Image (cartoon, rainbow, N blue to C red):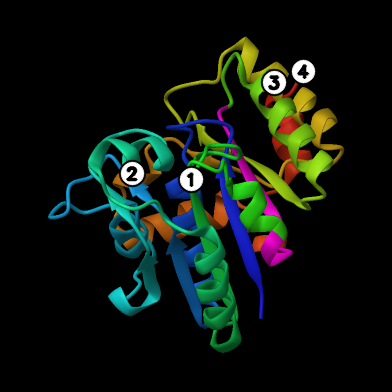
Amino acid sequence: MSILVVTGTGTGVGKTIATAALAALAATRGASLAVVKPAQTGVAEDEPGDLADVARLAGLADTDTYEYARYPDPLSPAAAARISGLPPVSLHDAAADIRKLADSRRLVLVEGAGGLLVRYDEDGTTLADLARDLNAPVLVVADPALGTLNHTALTLESMALRGVELAGVVLGSWPCEPDEPDLAMRCNIRDLETLAARPLAGAIRSGAGTLDAPDFLLAARAGLSPAFGGTFDASAFRSRYGL
């Protein structure tokens, strides 16, 4: 039984694709798993959400994915619930459901909305609170581009202050050939590892979300470290790109 929470340093950094990569690698090992999205925002009721992308890329069945609340406006869960007039999601109830899933699954992945401290209700409950309630480590998905150091440092500091365990830092969208990382991206490799006090846990190629499931599995394997079932070598990556 294992629970892993996935957050990002902000919106649009590749959190859903990283979650799909984790799920794909777990599924190919034959592990029973569930993927949970406590709150989906910015998607209408009849539209596919983030979990549909995870299921498509990782080859999961509908019974492997769980969404507890959905709001149509692209806002924080708390603001989206308030604007829509719908009740906010209860992360306390979500924690209880996730524990039940973990009793029958080898791995439960929990994907947050936005970043670590985005509010889910008017009391200010956050994904950090959920992770602490579940006593679950958090994988941080970071943008490799200029500006990421401050966002990542704030996320990691907030986790440390709250006693939330870091599972690792993954670059959510790394340029792949023929594109090349710019100077800031290359410098950020070493600096992000310094902030995390450990090697990078992965770097997922940009555009991976457009691949079909077999090719996505290859990208997931290359983009995540052995701790998550992949082959990503942080030392080799640093030697190739880092400054």
Secondary structure state at the residue bearing disc 2: helix
Magenta span includes 137: yes
Crowding at dot 4, Cα within 10 Å, few <14 / some 14-19 / many 20+, comes out as some
Magenta span includes 135: yes
Tell me the amino acid under the disc marked 4.
Answer: Leu
Indicate which disc, 4 or 3, sits on the residue closer to the N terminus: 3
Spatial CA distance of label 1 from label 3 is 25 Å
**Mark 4 = which residue?**
243
- Among all residues in the image, which is located at the extreme bottom? 104
**Disc 1 to disc 3: CB gap under 8 Å:** no
**Disc 1 to disc 4: CB gap under 8 Å:** no
Secondary structure state at the residue bearing disc 4: loop
Secondary structure state at the residue bearing disc 1: loop
Indicate which disc, 1 or 2, sits on the residue closer to the N terminus: 2
The answer to whether any part of residue 31 appears in the image is: no
Indicate which disc, 4 or 2, sits on the residue closer to the N terminus: 2
x and y, in percent, of residue 214 in the image: 36, 63
x and y, in percent, of residue 23 in the image: 49, 65
Q: Which mark is residue 149?
A: 3
**Disc 2 to disc 3: CB gap under 8 Å:** no
Q: Which mark is residue 120?
A: 1
Q: Is residue 112 above or below residue 188?
A: below
Indicate which disc, 2 or 3, sits on the residue closer to the N terminus: 2
- Left/right of residue 84 with respect to residue 217 in the rendered view: left
Tell me the amino acid under the disc marked 3.
Answer: Leu
